[in-house]
Amino acid sequence: MPPRPNTIVAAAPDTIPFIAPERLEREAGRPFAARLGANEGNLGPSPAAIAAMEKAARDDAWKYPDPENRALREALCAHLGTAMDEIVVGPGIDGLLGLIVRIFSVAGAAIVSSRGAYPTFAYHVTGHGRRLVTAEYRDDREDLDALAALCREETARIVYVSNPDNPMGTWWDAQDVTRFFDAVPDSTLIVLDEAYGETAPEGTLPAIDTARPNLLRLRTFSKAHGLAGLRCGYALGHRALTAPFDKVRDHFGVSLLSQAGALAALGDRAYLAQTVQRIAEARERIAAIGRANGLTPLPSATNFVALDCGSEGAHAMALLDALAARGVFLRKPMVAPLDRCIRVSVGRPGELDHFEGVLAEACAAVGEGR
Amino acid sequence: MPPRPNTIVAAAPDTIPFIAPERLEREAGRPFAARLGANEGNLGPSPAAIAAMEKAARDDAWKYPDPENRALREALCAHLGTAMDEIVVGPGIDGLLGLIVRIFSVAGAAIVSSRGAYPTFAYHVTGHGRRLVTAEYRDDREDLDALAALCREETARIVYVSNPDNPMGTWWDAQDVTRFFDAVPDSTLIVLDEAYGETAPEGTLPAIDTARPNLLRLRTFSKAHGLAGLRCGYALGHRALTAPFDKVRDHFGVSLLSQAGALAALGDRAYLAQTVQRIAEARERIAAIGRANGLTPLPSATNFVALDCGSEGAHAMALLDALAARGVFLRKPMVAPLDRCIRVSVGRPGELDHFEGVLAEACAAVGEGR
């Protein structure tokens, strides 16, 4: 009998969180004119980050990266006001989520999330043989009361919440988030995904408080910093929660070029502020384009806007397909009632021009729905 | 009771596989003049790879990387004569080793390696709560007969072998390796780490045979290709062994810049051939420097040379420290009898000049040993 995966891996589904635009392009035989589906940093990174990556490519690519991610962690500490041992740098939030599930739960343990939330978290939960328990979205936001109640009922090991929310773009104020912290049992690890924190209105992110013994917050260079290609994110929280990562993480897992690019991006606050402003303007433009075509934009604190197509999921999916046929890569939520929306990322001006230019035709092609 | 790591992670040791030279430099308050301890690609990558990384930094760093690693896998297939579904690209061999342990074994299962072999494999074995069972090195090579026997005795799930060998630089011929394949039970997954395959003499690497149902071979861009900073490696083998990776791996885990750099490096065969030649010459030079100072070089098929200091481990360690105090970063095997050696990586000519310049003084400082 040849070697086979263990029962946990064998039982994991074959479905993966995302189909890449590259694959859709290969299947269609042509590139997308507007890549607006993955909430990337289409506006691009700071020139300082580009220069740092170019220099690292020339001078240092032959070296192993610093396994302690020291320079980047020092800069993050200075920026956030945390201590060195309260920060873990990892290969994007995706990689950190896998480690969190692995470290802080056991096979069969209940882990709480919202049905329809970021699928990569659910992917890691099932991939590690843990048990996903979900609450429903409510009014297009994660239902913090329901999530906290589930944690209590299920004696959950972990609860995952994103704020601002992916895939809806909605958000809770810091006050509400802090109330949620207090409602979750002390024994449940709260994983607060703040990938879109930089683009949220003031008052969205709770103050940094690494004294809380059951909270890890996740942040990334993939969104507002425009560096999704690097795979560089970080977790911050109480040192009793960050310390165990060092016992199991892939110490050399964050590339040297990624550490260099992220460090330079973090240092260019002016560019970040400018990008955040441009993202806010592009959100307004996406909303206006939607409204002009009978679609209702949801309020967004992220680098994308969910457009309510006013009907059931099949109609929104047909519109997504009609847009793909016209060169626009989008994604959409897949569970009802969120699935009535399509999700449009902030793109470069030319990409939004293309989207605007084909949306009316795509809407006409799929009709009114229902 | 706040969240705590599960019993497997809690039981894992705090020791990590490697202390980074960056850390030693911070502690010493000055950089090393010769970075010769990590078997990196000191001679640097192909100019084509540098150009590809620079272009990716400028144009594409904002995008998520292709989660299917398609372009790189296609090029690897063309190069190796394998099928697309017989290759898995991952964040370096280190990252792939972690996945292999996770996928193909269960808690408490016996996993076989050599005592003193690549420590990152052992790190992942204990980090996943598996049981490491070791054979001894014999005449400074992994003892293939003893490893195969241990697999049978322990009904091992996995056996790990590196050929050429790290940390000794020694190697087995393809014939011997193939005999080892046949001696291992069909139910044991053979993990053959060929990180140093490009620098080995002809006749070292068995022919590619992905029909063998219990063999995964690991390769990397970190060594001969000079791209340790990228974290890009791959596994090749039977599709029943490669398929399960897709169910649990971090699909976006290999950075976009890394994929671009690796692809360009793979395409520059002339540069690789030149580097392999320069590595062979540098090995000769390291051996000659060693001999001139009373140290006996072991034959090497890698990008480093183990120098036998002719005494016990404490003496070799004292020499390592004396060299560190003189600006030379080296590492050494840590278990007897391998620990009588220090290990010198192929460096740039100036780095070897520095090593040569301080070795006599360092030897004099520590005396004859024993």
Image (cartoon, coloured by chain):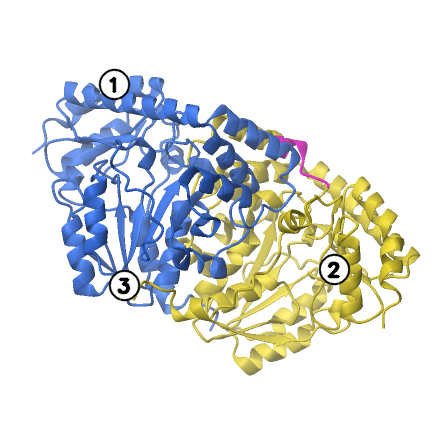
Chain colours: A yellow, B blue
Output the chain of dot 1: B
- Residue B187's label in the rendered image is 3
Looking at the rendered structure, the kind of residue marked 3 is: Ser
Q: Position of residue A65 (x, y in %)?
A: 45, 38
Residue type, label 2: Gly
Tell me which corner region of the image, top left, top right, bottom left or bottom right, holds residue B242.
bottom left
Q: Nearer the viewer, residue B274 or A248?
A: B274
A47 drawn magenta:
yes
On screen, residue A78 versus residue A146, left or right, reads: left
Q: Nearer the viewer, residue B183 or A154?
A: B183
**Residue at 22% from the left image edge and 47% from the top image edge:** B178
Q: What whole-number distance in Å separates the C-alpha atoms at marks 1 and 3?
A: 49 Å
> Quick one: SS at disc 2?
loop
User: Dot 3: few (<14), some (14–19), or many (≥20) neighbours within 10 Å?
Assistant: some
- Disc number for residue B356: 1
On screen, A113 above or below B120? Answer: below
Range drawn in magenta: A43-50
Where is residue A5 shown, x and y percent of the image?
38, 65
Marks 2 and 1 in Cβ contact (< 8 Å): no
Which residue is drawn at the image coordinates 55% and 38% (left, top)? B257
- State the image coordinates of residue A249 (x, y, percent, origin top left): 42, 53
Point out which mark residue A196 bears: none
Mark 2 to mark 3: distance in Å? 49 Å
Residue beneath disc 2: A169
Q: Chain of mark 3?
A: B
